[in-house]
Image (cartoon, rainbow, N blue to C red):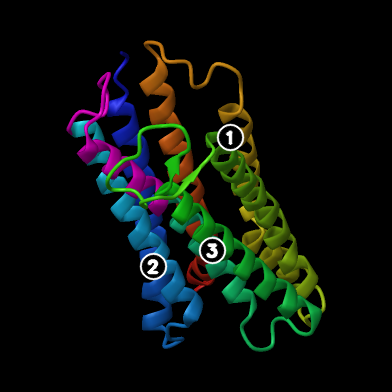
Amino acid sequence: FVNPSVEVNGGIWSLCLTASAFLGLRIWYKVTHKHGMWWDDYVLVASWLVLLTTCILISIEFGTGYVTKTWDNRMLILVSVSSVLTTVGQAWSKSAFAVTLLRPGITEGWQRWALWFIIASLNIYLTITFFLQWTNYCGETPYWWKIPRVCAPYETIANIKVGRNMWNIIMDFVLALFPWLVTWKLRIKQIEKIGICVTMSLGVVVAIATSWRTAWMMSPGLNDYNEWYFWRQGMSMVWYQSEVAGTIIVQTLPVIRHLWRD
C-alpha cells in the first residue's frame, strides 16, 4: 500500500496550526481591547479543541498501523472516534458563525428564526450521525464496542452521511449570504459595508472546497481496495479537517481586519 502518513500529518497539522494562529489573534484582540468574549467565541474555541483532538487521533492512527490490511478493535475505535469528532467540528464551527449573527442588534425577526433553524439542523444531523457511527451494519458480524442489538443497512448509513455533507455545503452558502442581508442596512460608508461583507462571507470559499471534496469522494473507484486505497482515505481526512479549520479561520478575519486597521 502507498503510505500517505507524511502528507496527511503535514496537511492536518498545517491546517491546525494556521487555525490556531488566527483564532489566537482573534481572542488576543478581543481581550486586550476589552471587547470581552461572547458565546460565539466559546463555541469557536470548542470547535478548535475538537479540531486539535481530531488531528492528534489521526496522527496516532497513522503512527500505529492505519496502513495495514486488517485493523484490530483498537484501530477501529480510534477511526470511529476521529470520524465522530470531525462531524462535531463541522457542526460546531458553522454554529459559531450563526451564533455571531445572533448578537443583539445584528439580526431580527425571521432572520433570527432562520439562524436558530440552521443551528438546530446542524446539531440534529450531528446527533444522528453520532449514533450511526456506533451502529452495527445489518447482516454483518457485530462489534462488541458498538450499540448492542441495534443495526442499520450500510446503504442507509452511507446515504445519511452523504446527506449530511450536502447539508453542510448548503449551510455554508446560506451563512455566507447572511452578512449581505444584515450589513447593507447599516448607516456606514459603502466601502466599509463591502469590506465587512466580504470578510464575513469568505465561508463561500469553504463551501466551494467542500463541494469539490464531496464530488471527489463520490467518484467511482474511490473505495476500491487497491494500493492507493489508504492514500485516498488519508487525503479525505485532510479535506475534512480543512473544512473545520477553514470555517474557524474565516470567522476570525472580521476581527483581524480591525487589528490590521489599528
Segment tinted magenta in the rendering: 64-85
**Whole-number angstrom distance, CA of label 1 to CA of label 3:** 35 Å
Say which residue appears at 53% left-offset and 57% top-offset. Answer: 128
Judging by the rendered image, the residue that carries numbered circle 2 is 46
Name the residue nearer the viewer: 118 or 128.
Answer: 128
Amino acid identity at mark 2: Ala
Image mark count: 3
Q: Inspect the magenta stretch and tell me whether residue 78 lies in it.
A: yes
Image location (x, y in percent) of residue 228: 40, 14
Crowding near pointer 3: few (<14 within 10 Å), some, many (20+)?
Answer: many
Q: Disc 3 vs disc 2: Cβ atoms closer than 8 Å?
A: no
Q: Residue at the spot x=21%, y=32% of the render?
A: 72
Residue 90 shows in the view: yes
Q: Would you place residue 3 above or below residue 163 in this image?
A: above
Q: Residue 251: give its label.
A: 3
Give the residue at mark 1: 155
Which tag is nearer the camera, tag 2 or tag 1?
1
Q: Nearer the viewer, mark 1 or mark 3?
A: 1
